């Protein structure tokens, strides 16, 4: 098994991914994603800040929540269905000595987004960082067979939800605060079995640049992290068998990434380290596409 700084970094063959029921709980996975940042060296970069992370119960969202807490931020998360995953995230945030707020909500509802932002502000005493991370995908071998309801759910969650959350957050944000969107390498390269999902990710990239331009005068920064093949509950819960067998193999590093490997990119965009970065799309992909 690959290791980096004593952290296990399994290959696809070592993970041996297999389909699981959706929605998939991280706690039910045989090979749980590494989200705990056990070797992370914090430096107080977010001391006194309050962050709200959508899809913060597992995978990338959990890793970002833990990284922010280690850096000194109080953290609220929005989760949709997996309360047990949200509880684990909360325990990790609180273990870092920070306040934690868990909100069950559906980001497809503008009212739910407004309520979540307001609740975060009132209960945690501020609002400085929005991380749009909630996502839905479902793999299909045939584009023609994607159900209409799936198309609506994918777009309503992945791009409309980001817009609704940003609209709700902006009145609470001030100079130096940040919005961070989770895009995807699929939004640049496309994906034949996730056509609707990849399309929403491309929209998120354009949304990021457009919103950055809109908020520039207010000195509120807007950026996006573009993950490559990252090992999260969505993978076994939504991808077709053919893609599971190759997941992560197409990278230069030859393996899937772990959620905690993405978290420092979010810290960069949320902190003063990223004070001159806005409208950027940062790829964290293990090297994609790999030259053939």
Image (cartoon, rainbow, N blue to C red):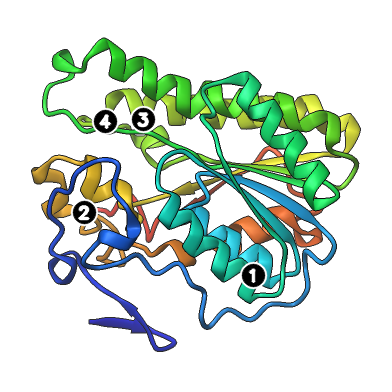
> In the image, residue 1 lies at what x, y percent?
22, 82
- Earlier residue among tags 1 and 2: 1
Separation of residues labelled 1 and 2 (CA atoms)? 33 Å
The image quarter in which residue 190 lies = top left
In this image, 38 relative to 11: left or right?
Answer: right
Residue contact between numbered discs 4 and 2, judged by CB atoms under 8 Å: no
Circle 4 residue: 194
In this image, 152 relative to 49: left or right?
Answer: left
Separation of residues labelled 4 and 1 (CA atoms)? 36 Å
Q: Nearer the viewer, mark 3 or mark 1?
A: 1
Q: Nearer the viewer, mark 1 or mark 2?
A: 1
Foreground pick, 120 / 252: 120
Q: Residues within 10 Å of mark 4 (few under 14, many from 20)?
A: many
> In the image, residue 29 lies at what x, y percent?
25, 61
Q: Nearer the viewer, mark 4 or mark 1?
A: 1
Residue 247 numbered mark, or none: 2
Circle 1 residue: 94
Q: Mark 2: which secondary structure?
A: loop
Residue contact between numbered discs 4 and 3, judged by CB atoms under 8 Å: yes
Residue 262 numbered mark, or none: none
In this image, 19 relative to 152: left or right?
Answer: left
Residue 198 numbered mark, or none: 3
The image quarter in which residue 146 lies = top left
Q: Residues within 10 Å of mark 1 (few under 14, many from 20)?
A: some
């Amino acid at each position: 098994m690959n290791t980096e700084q004593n952290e296990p970094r399994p290959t696809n063959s070592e993970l041996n991914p297999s389909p699981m029921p959706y929605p998939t709980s991280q706690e039910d996975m045989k090979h749980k994603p590494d989200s705990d940042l056990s070797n992370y060296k914090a430096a107080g970069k977010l001391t006194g800040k309050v962050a709200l992370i959508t899809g913060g119960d597992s995978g990338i969202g959990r890793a970002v929540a833990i990284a922010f807490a280690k850096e000194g931020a109080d953290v609220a998360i929005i989760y949709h269905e997996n309360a047990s995953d949200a509880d684990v995230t909360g325990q990790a945030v609180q273990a870092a000595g920070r306040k934690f707020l868990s909100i069950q909500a559906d980001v497809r509802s503008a009212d739910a987004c407004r309520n979540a932002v307001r609740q975060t502000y009132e209960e945690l005493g501020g609002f400085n960082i929005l991380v749009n991370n909630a996502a839905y995908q479902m793999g299909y071998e045939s584009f023609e067979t994607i159900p209409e309801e799936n198309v609506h759910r994918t777009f309503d969650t992945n791009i409309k939800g980001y817009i609704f959350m940003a609209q709700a957050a902006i009145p609470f944000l001030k100079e130096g605060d940040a919005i961070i969107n989770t895009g995807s390498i699929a939004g640049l390269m496309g994906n034949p079995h996730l056509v609707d999902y990849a399309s929403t990710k491309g929209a998120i990239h354009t949304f990021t640049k457009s919103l950055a331009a809109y908020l520039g005068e207010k000195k509120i920064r807007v950026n996006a992290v573009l993950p490559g093949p990252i090992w999260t509950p969505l993978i076994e819960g939504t991808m077709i068998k053919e893609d599971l067998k190759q997941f992560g193999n197409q990278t230069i590093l030859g393996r899937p990434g772990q959620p905690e490997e993405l978290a420092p990119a979010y810290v960069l965009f949320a902190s003063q380290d990223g004070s001159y970065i806005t409208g950027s799309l940062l790829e964290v992909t293990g090297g994609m596409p790999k030259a053939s």
